[in-house]
Image (spheres, rainbow, N blue to C red):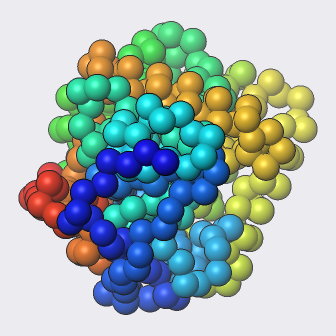
Amino acid sequence: MGTAETVENTRLVEVVLPGVVEPEGLRIQQREIPAPGPGQIVVRMEATGVSFAEQQMRRGRYYDQPPFPFVPGYDLVGTVLTAGEGVTPGLVGRRVAALVKVGGWASHVVLDAADAVEVPAGVGAAEAETLVVNGITAWQMLHRKARVRSGGTVLVHGANGGVGTVLVQLARAAGLKVIGTASARHHEALRELGVTPVDYRAEDVPARVRELAPGGVDAVFDHLGGRSVVDSWRLLAPGGTLVSYGSATTRDNSGSKQLPVLKILGRVWLWNALPNGRHAYFFNIWEGRALRKDRFRARLGTDLTQVFQALQRGDVAARVAARLPLTRAAEALRLAESGTVAGKVVLVPDSGEGESASPAL
């Protein structure tokens, strides 16, 4: 078994979500660092993110979250410390990224080695972290689902958010015109990216989009759900594609956490049955994993590598909204939920290699 562990990193620190709580209800605990089993690796976390999924999970609203208590954290970037039997020894000491859904908010994480994707040399941990779940989601929705030809026009809801920020940059790199919804404070930054901004608070979004694209848009990327997904469908041009990937408007609702998603799925099924040439998808990043794990892993690795290459080319800029130590996860979650930052809030180790930074407001 290979190792790159140092003496001072002898305990695992993790953030536990004990139930439906306010961010301050998160618990910090320590335990022994586990040994990797066959085919597994232990990764020392260098960066993990705060995504919309954790915001839903703390409310008990993420549609397939595990029972409480558990360690949240949808993705991470870190260095491989130890490798179990059957793992290529050369992986130890390499920086890797992984999509995990839960478990990422910890100083050390055990993974199947096959789920790790190497991070290119020269790409920092926090920068890479902003592009794991957000980058894969944006890339697959744009290039595997919508497939809009160069010169087309797309509408991105929440264009200043974690996924939205990556998505608009990838779309511009693909030669697309982009209309993006966001609050007014983010419009200047969006214009700098070549996006035509629409203020969802002060404007009638469907009416404004119709002014900008009288013939309809070629694709809409909608994380809002609820009424928005219906409006998004109606804004499509002939042959256009709706990609729904969440139900943010129901985040604070009570009742069934599955119902908002089931309603979207029902609409998607109905719309696809209509003979009008338009298409609708509900994007699930985990689609295919249960039945075709090897194929899922290969696709994820290929797509994340493409995103990292886009970063290296300058097609995408990694937007770190703020860096905070792991033990300040409650503060990081509050900041991410505030809607005041652009990009992704990142958690880093408390050891000093990731000092907290001022939010990019």
Q: How many labels does the image show?
A: 0
Q: Where is residue 12 drawn, in percent x and y?
A: 36, 71
Q: Where is residue 302 drawn, in percent x and y?
A: 56, 25
Q: Nearer the viewer, residue 103 or 9?
A: 9
Task: Please state, as top left, top right, bottom left or bottom right, where the C terminus lies in the image.
Answer: bottom left
With respect to residue 255, does 201 lie above or below? above
Q: Where is residue 57 drawn, in percent x and y?
A: 53, 73
With respect to residue 151, does 147 lie above or below? below
With respect to residue 97, does 353 lie above or below? below
Q: Is residue 267 left or right of residue 236?
A: right
| Residue at x 24% of width, y 57% of height | 6
| Residue at x 58% of width, y 84% of height | 68
Q: In which quarter of the image is residue 291?
A: top right
Is residue 41 visible to us here? yes
Is residue 333 visible to us here? no
Q: Nearer the viewer, residue 161 or 311?
A: 311
Q: Where is residue 130 drawn, in percent x and y?
A: 34, 44
Q: In this view, does 114 lie to the left or right of 357?
A: right
| Residue at x 44% of width, y 88% of height | 21
Q: Quadrant of residue 27?
A: bottom left
Q: Which of 215 and 38 is in front in this view?
A: 38
| Residue at x 49% of width, y 87% of height | 18
With respect to residue 35, does 287 lie above or below? above
